[in-house]
Amino acid sequence: MTDLTDLTLAEARDALAKKKISALDLANAQIAQIERARALNAFVTETPDVARAMAIESDARIARGEAGPLEGMPLGIKDLYCTAGVQTTAGSHILEGFTPAYESTVSANLWRDGAVMLGKLNLDEFAMGSSNETSYFGPVISPWRRQGANAALVPGGSSGGSSAAVAAHLCFGATATDTGGSIRQPAAFTGTVGIKPTYGRCSRWGIVAFASSLDQAGPIARTVRDAAILLRSMAGHDPKDTTSVNVPVPDYEAAVGRSIKGMKIGIPKEYRLDGMSPEIEKLWDQGIAWMKEAGASIVEISLPHTRYALPAYYIVAPAEASSNLARYDGVRYGLRVPGKDIADMYESTRAAGFGKEVRRRIMIGTYVLSAGYYDAYYVRAQKIRTLIKRDFELAFADGVDAILTPATPSAAFGLGEKGSTDPVEMYLNDIFTVTVNMAGLPGIAVPAGTSSEGLPLGLQVIGRAFDEETLFAVAGAIEQAAPKVAPPPKWWAVGE
């Protein structure tokens, strides 16, 4: 039989249902794979004992005919989600050793449906980064390498542990979060599928906050179908989160494979940037051709405020981060560095506990919220945000069903190659993704090809609010049409 870790989540689910394998078999296979792949640094905390205990419970429920939709599926959890009794760090020294007494709503939904926890996945500190190089626990290494080279590549960020673990077959799927592209960009970099749902589709309760009006939970998986299966369990109304929307959760899996014939796909002219990589432009044109072949019509649309999205995002997000991260002061939980008085203790704790990028964003955010600058920066950025949202509303009102764009401006880059001297160079990685967060819309990244160096490239599909079903249908069409890319060689695997 195929190595169990090479099954997709849907295949593993069906094999379990037919009693061909057990949940414990799956958990043990993944635990062994994780132990062999520690060179990737994808996990902050491994929980093999928890995984085995949960798998045994799953097997018992299957035997009783009480299996849930995700029964026995071993998953990785981004270490931004609070997990009862298991360390939750947000990739930061300031939360090292923090063990919540409560479970995030999204992870609780997964356990309710029978999923099994393999551990907590590495991420950029407080989800602030596009490469997973800002984690206090060290960078995550992508399982991918350029053809003929051994240089370590980034898996994208902030959900780099999630994307690397899924790409390296260390789990059947992973939770992730997306504030400005932190699901879609790492998915595109690693040849995986990542969906950022509509703002309010998944509860934010129990997820460590970065920018509360932008953060959204979502899955990273190996296939469009697997992502659909995971999102159905993750989504749902939560009275504990006032931004959670009380709307029915559709059967997303049923939308995968649905015909897109007759759909109108918008192509925003503003996304054709000066100096765009020829590889990315070619990929986009190929995606447009696939849409036409599937029976969709292509229309050029205008999203005129797109060029202001990135600067507006890097005002709004740090401002909200500055406010959210004020709670980490050494008083109630997490790191405490003693000082001569309480003010000195605050300063010493925050200086020692936060990394360079987090400190930078807190300072930017505090500055744009300060007296004299609030109107000039923060208020103007929020007005631009409203205009960005209106651009999308006008496009959808014109009959566009979905919008097709590139997911990233390039393939994955090497560790230390970007942002070391100019942080804006790193921020530009979010150029195709931040508009979706600013407008609160759903977006999905799906593998669509490879670069000249053999690295994955992805396309992004953007949809109407709460119309993730259309995204899954369009993404499924891309997945069907795109050339199948073999997984990367297991250069990291010990004992193989």
Image (cartoon, rainbow, N blue to C red):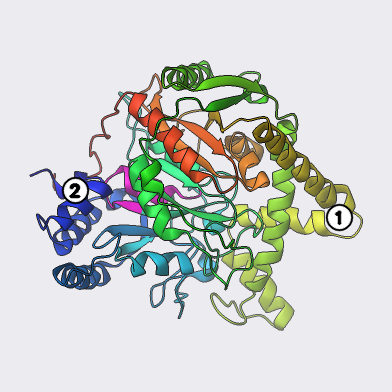
Disc 2 to disc 1, how far (Cα)?
Answer: 53 Å
Disc 2 marks a residue whose amino acid type is Val
Query: Where the N terminus falls, by quadrant?
Result: top left
> Label for residue 494?
2
Does the magenta segment cover residue 463? no
Q: Judging from the image, what secondary structure is the residue with disc 2 in?
A: loop
Q: Is residue 144 above or below residue 324?
A: above
- 349 to the left or right of 471: right
Q: Is residue 333 above or below residue 283?
A: below
Query: Where the C terminus falls, by quadrant?
Result: top left
The residue carrying mark 1 is 374
**Residue closest to the eye, 92 or 283:** 283
- The image quarter containing residue 394 is top right
Q: Which residues are magenta?
A: 152-173
Q: Earlier in the sequence, mark 2 or mark 1?
A: 1
**Residue at the (43%, 59%) spot, across then down:** 234
- The image quarter containing residue 300 is top right
